[in-house]
Image (cartoon, grey):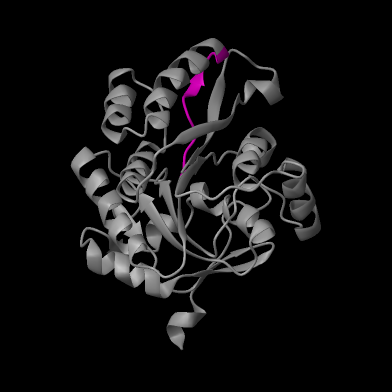
Amino acid sequence: MAAQSIVRPPAVAGKFYPSEPAVLRRDIESYLPSSPEKISALGCMVPHAGYMYSGHVAGAVLGRLQLPQRFVILCPNHTGRGEPLAIMSRGAWATPLGDAQIDRALAAELVAEFDLLTEDAEAHRTEHALEVELPFLQVLEPGFTFVPVAIGTHRIDVLTELGKAIARVVSRQNEPVLVIASSDMNHYATDAVTHEKDKLAIAPLLARDPRALHETVLRENISMCGLGPAVAMLSAVNDLGANSAELVKYATSADVSGDRSYCVGYAGIIVR
C-alpha cells in the first residue's frame, strides 16, 4: 500500500502553466486544433517551454493524435540531479487537473529489459520537461497511465539501445503505447540563427535517422535539450515499424515575445 501513496507534486504549476484548474483546461483547449482528423502514431516529439510560448506547438501535435491510454514519456534532465537514465515505476504525478498514474506494469518490464534504467525520483523532482506534457494528456485522454524516464546522457550507444528496449517492451503489449519525446530546439540565439540550426536538426528527425540527428546536433552545436529523448524515441519507433514522419508545427519564442535577438525554437513532430 505504501507504494501507491507516492505522489510527485507539481514543480512548475503557476510558472510554466496555470495552477488554477479551470484556467489550465481553458488554455490547453485553446491550443488544440479545431475538428482535427485524428491519426494514430508510434511516437512524437513535443516542446516543453512555458505554455504561452510553446503550448500551441504541443497542442497541434497531441490534439491531432488518436491517443492511446498508455505512454512512455522521455524527457531531458535539465537539473543534473539523479541518475543518467532515471525511471519512476510506481505512484502518481500530481497536476492541477488531478493525479496522473504511473504504469507500474509497463515500467517494471522496461527496467527488466534494460538494466541501465535506474529507479530514481530525484532526477524527476524539479524537472519541468515531462510535467508540462501531462495536463495536455489529462485533457485529451483522461485516465491514461505513463512511464516517466529522464535522460541525462548523450551517449549514442546507450540512447539507441534504450530505444530498442522500449520497442521490445511496447511490441509485447496488448494495447497501443505512444512513445513521447519532450524537447525544445535551439536555445538563445537570434531568430534567424535558430531557424537555420533547427532546420538542420529537423531534417534527420523527419528522415527518422537517430544517428544522423545525434551527429548533426553535436557537429553544428545545436542546443537541442531533448537530443537524448529524441534519439531514443526514433530508435524505438524505427524498430516498431515506423515509415513516415511529419513536421506538424514549428515556431520560436520570438513569435510571441517579439524579441528576435534571443529566442528558443519549438518543433512538433509525429512519427507513424
Residue 260 sits above or below residue 114 on the image: above
Q: Position of residue 251 (x, y in %)?
A: 60, 25
Q: Quadrant of residue 266?
A: top right
- Using the rendered view, name the quadrant where residue 250 is placed: top right
Asked whether 184 falls inside the magenta stretch, the response is: yes
Name which residue lies at 42% across and 30% down: 206
- Where residue 82 appears, as percent x and y from the top left, is 33, 55
Left or right, 209 with reference to 131: left
- Which residue sits furthest bottom? 1
**Residue in view at x 22 percent, y 49 percent:** 161
Camera-side residue: 2 or 132? Answer: 132
Q: Is residue 84 visible?
A: no
Residue 117 is situated, as x and y percent measured from the top left of the image, at 27, 60
How many numbered discs, if any? 0
Q: Work out whether residue 245 or residue 101 is closer to the camera in this orientation and state it.
A: 245
- The residue under the point 67% across, 22% down is 255
Residue 24 appears left or right of 220? right
- The magenta stretch is 182-191
Magenta highlight on residue 53: no
- Is 266 positioned to the left or the right of 125 in the image? right
Q: Nearer the viewer, residue 9 or 195?
A: 195
The answer to whether one can see residue 265 in this image is: yes
Picture quadrant of residue 140: bottom right
Q: Is residue 57 above or below residue 222?
A: below
- Write the residue at 45% across / 47% down: 43
